Image (spheres, coloured by chain):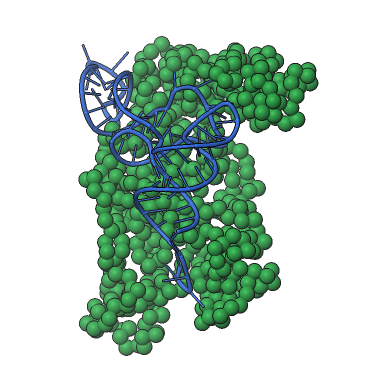
Amino acid sequence: MDVKKLLQESILRAAHTAIADGVFSADQLPPIVLEVPPQKEFGDFATNFAMQAAKYARANPKIIAQVIVDRIQEEWLDKAVIAGPGFINFYLKPEWLYSMLAEIIRAGSSYGIVGDKSKEKIQVEFVSANPTGPLHVGHGRGAAVGSALVNLLKAAGYDVQAEFYINDAGNQIDNLAASVNARYLELCGVEVEFPIDGYHGYDIIETAQRIINRDGQKYLDISDGERLSIFKELALTEKLAALKEDLEAFGVNFDVWFSERALHQNGNLQAVCQILKDRGYMYEQDGALWLRSTAYGDDKDRVVIRDNGIPTYLAADIAYHLNKFERGFSTVINLWGADHHGYIPRMKAAVASLGYDPKQLEIMILQMVSLYRNGELVKMSKRTGQSVTLLELIEEVGKDAARFFFIMRSTDSQLDFDLDLAKSKSNENPVYYIQYAHARICSIFRQAQEVGIDTGDLEQAELKLLTNECEIDLIKKLGEFPEEIISAAQERTVHRLAHYVHDLASLFHGFYNQCRIIGVDSQLQSARLALVLAVKITIGNALAVLGIEAPEKM
RNA sequence: CUGCCCGUAGCUCAGCUGGAUAGAGCGUUUGACUACGAAUCAAAAGGCCGCAGGUUCGAAUCCUGCCGGGCAGGCCA
C-alpha cells in the first residue's frame, strides 16, 4: 500500500543481501531516509543511504550505491540510478500515484489522521493568561498555535488534552480586586488613591460600572476587607467568562480549566513541599524554604515558601506539574511567551526533583508579536501596558486570517504582524489564497451538478488518464499530507502545515489554469473531478487542523 | 556581565535529523479572462545565507569566537 515503506524495505533487503554476499561489511547501518528530490529529473524518491552507510562500511559511497541498485528489483519500480556524490534516485511506475489518489477519496475527512498513539497521553497547556484583563495579540499567538498544535497531535494519533491554568490566586488577583474597588469608589464619588500595581485598563472601569448598575452603592456600607473579597469573586468570574468568550470567538476551546486556587485549598502545596523535602531537594534558609534547583542545572536555588510563609508562584507551579504527571500524561507541553523563558531551568529542575524525566516537560517558547499598520509599528499604550486586544484583532482582520498569520511563522521567530496584509481580501493574502482554492473546487462541483454530471464513485474513475505534469505534481503533493502531519507533530511545528497547505493550493491553482475539468472527454472529466475532490479533501483537512474555515463560497 | 531566540532576495519569512543548481509570499517588470470563480495563472529581475575560523567527501544547517537586534536574569507573575 505505502510505496515509501515498500521502498525502504527493499533497500534494507538489498543492503543485507549485499553484506551476506560479502560485497561490503558494516556492523551497523544508518536509517533509510527517503526524500522527495529537489528536482523532478531526480525521480520520485531519493536516498542518501549509500553515503551514510559509507561511513560505517568505510567504502566508496558510489560503490555501495551500485551494489544496492544491482540488488533491487520490484515490479512497481521503474528504475533506480546513482547520481551525484552517491544518491540513489528511484523512478516508480505511475500506478502508485493513482492508487494513492483513490485512497484519499476513500478516506475522505479522515485522510491525514494517521497512526494510533492513543496510549500516549499528551497535555498541552497554553494561553493561561491572568484573568485580570482582556487578551492581547501576544496571547493570540499562543492561542492559535496552541489550539492548532492540539489538533495536530490528535491528527497524529495521540490522546491529547487542552488545558488552561487559571491564575486565580496570589498578588495579581488581589490587585485586580483592589483596582475594581478603587474604580467602584471613584464612580460612587469617593476620593481614593489608585493602587500602585493596579490595572489601568478600561475594562476595570466597566466591571465597576456593571457592579453599580446591578447592585448600586450598597457595598459602600461594608468594610474594605469584605468589599475587596466580594469584588475579587465578582471580577474573577467576569474576567474568566470574558476570557472564555474571546477564546471561543477565536476558535479555541479547552478540555480543562484548572484552578490554581484549588491547589492551595486542597493542600497540594504543602504536600509537594513534603515530597521534595523527603527527596532531599528542599531546604530551609533565612526563614524561607528553597528548592535545590541547582542540583539540576539551574543558576541558583529558588524560594518556594517565603519567609513570611506565603508561597511563591513557583510553589503552585510545582504542585501543578506534579498534578499533571499524576494524571498520567507521558508528555506535558507548555506554551509560554518569550518573557518567561528564564523560568525554564527551575521548572525542569522541579520536575526532575519530583522524580520525573525533565524531557517529559516540553516548554515551547513563543517569540514576541509586533503589530504593523501602514508600515509602522503599533505601539502599546504606556499607561495600560496593553496593545491591541485579541478581540479587536479578530474584528479587524477576521478569525481565519488572524489564526493563519499567527501560525504561519516558526514560533522561534519574532512575528511581525502586518494588519493591512492580513485584512486585505485580495491576492496578497495567503489565507484567502488557500480558501479560494477550496471555494473554487466547491464551485466546480456545483457547476458539475447543474449540468448533470455524476459526481459519485469518483475513486472508480480512470485515474491513469491523469498524465499531465501538473496533475502528477498535484497528486504527489496530496500524497505527502500524512507524513507532513507526522513530522509536524513530532517536531511540534504547526507552521510547516501552513506552508504545506499553501503549496498545495498553489499547485491546484496552476493545474486549474492549465487543465479544463468540466466539458472534456467524460472519462478524463471524471478523473479530473476525482483529483479535484482529493484536493478539496486535503485542503479541508489541513485547514481543520489549523482551525481555519474551508468555505464553499467566498 | 550571563542565559535563551533571531540574523537567508528591496520587505516578511521557509529551508526537516549536514547532501544534488539556496526556496516561497509580498513588492517591481512583462504577458494571459467571448468556456469551470482573474481573491487566479505564466514569465523575468533580485542572494559573499551577519562576519571570521573549525569539523568532513560535502555546511545556510554542526562547533567556537566576534558583530547586530529581541527577551530574560525578584522571597513579582
- Quadrant assignment for the N terminus of chain A: top right
**Residue pictured at 52% horizontal, 58% vertical:** A344
Along the line of sight, which residue is nearer the eye, A152 or B29?
A: B29
Question: Taking A448 as reference, is A380 above or below it?
Answer: below
**Residue pictured at 49% horizontal, 16% vertical:** A41
Q: Quadrant of residue A115?
A: top right
Question: Taking A331 as reference, is A494 above or below it?
Answer: above
Q: Position of residue A95 (x, y in %)?
A: 56, 16
Q: Is residue A373 left or right of A514 when viewed as pictured?
A: left
Along the line of sight, which residue is nearer the eye, A449 or A121?
A: A121
Chain letter for the blue colouring in the rendering? B
Q: Position of residue A77 (x, y in %)?
A: 61, 15
| Tally of marks | 0
**Residue pictured at 67% horizontal, 31% vertical:** A30
- Quadrant assignment for the C terminus of chain A: top left
| Observer able to see residue A113 | no
| Observer able to see residue A338 | yes
**Residue pictured at 59% horizontal, 65% vertical:** A293
Question: Taking B49 as reference, is B38 above or below it?
Answer: above
Q: Is residue B61 left or right of A212 when viewed as pictured?
A: right
In the figure, what tint was chain A given? green
Q: Position of residue A175 (x, y in %)?
A: 38, 74
Q: Is residue A372 left or right of A495 when viewed as pictured?
A: left
Question: Taking A289 as reference, is A5 above or below it?
Answer: above
